[in-house]
Image: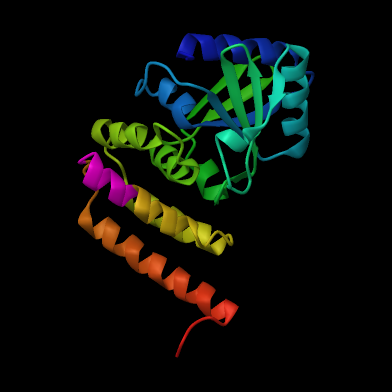
Amino acid sequence: MVNLEDQQKLFEAIGKKLKKRTKCFVVGGSAMLYYGAKSATKGIDVVFDDKEDFDNFLKILKEIEFKVKNPEMLYFGKKNKPALMERGLDRIDIFYKEIICFRLSETMIGRIGKIYEYGNLIVHIVSSEDIILLKSATERAGDRGDAAELIKIFNIKWDIIIKEALHQTELEKPLFVVFLYEFLLGLKEDFKADVPDEVLKKLLKMSEEQIIKRLKKKGNLIK
């Protein structure tokens, strides 16, 4: 498990070795640490929107004795899996633009509220709404519990959730809204999270529309 202090020390070590300013986006439990919404996380999750920054980050991790691991056990059968790096009990999941069925969008970047500098490593912390959106995409062990905790602690702006789900369909991620609906429905039913019924209704309608579009495109829709 990694706490905020551990995470910051690692970022400082990486930032000292990087030769140019490198921007990354911290998501998942790693972002929750900065909001005080979690005391420790199993792994550090980072996303890059620049391939050179992504490659340089991986290079530094190898220099400080992180080893490449197969991500299939954590992300079995999923597309757009991250590069997975481990050193002892430390694990870092590194995504490039695509996070399973979700794409790092300009709207998500525009909601960044916290930025930290660790030498040449510039860390952008995503909003609480985007943490929930991304957890619905990755859906690893503990992700539902984390999302339920965020809903409990923060005044979630559900209009942002809806708008980003729609935006993802425009970015050719049509199935994201389906996964988001199922994820939030599970939070409401299994974790008693305060997910508004109106939000679920809108997402269900959007999900049905996307499924119909996919069936029409494949020619499988019976008229």
x and y, in percent, of residue 22 in the image: 70, 27
Residue in the picture at 40% in, 52% down: 180
x and y, in percent, of residue 210 in the image: 46, 69
Tag count: 0
Q: Quadrant of residue 132?
A: top left
Q: Is the residue 46 above or below the residue 175 in the image?
A: above
x and y, in percent, of residue 40 in the image: 42, 17
Magenta-span inclusion, residue 187: yes
Q: Is the residue 220 above or below the residue 87 in the image?
A: below
Magenta residues?
A: 184-192
Asked whether 44 or 155 is in front, the reply is 44
> On the picture, is 200 further left or further right than 51?
left
Q: Is the residue 219 above or below the residue 124 in the image?
A: below
Residue in the picture at 26% in, 38% down: 155
> On the picture, is 84 further left or further right than 187?
right
Quarter holding the C terminus?
bottom left
Asked whether 119 or 64 is in front, the reply is 64
Magenta-span inclusion, residue 163: no
Residue in the picture at 49% in, 82% down: 221
Magenta stretch secondary structure, dominant: helix
> On the picture, is 70 further left or further right than 1?
right
Residue in the picture at 51% in, 49% down: 107
Instruction: Give the image's coloring scheme.
Output: rainbow
x and y, in percent, of residue 116 in the image: 55, 21
Toward the bottom, the furthest residue is 223
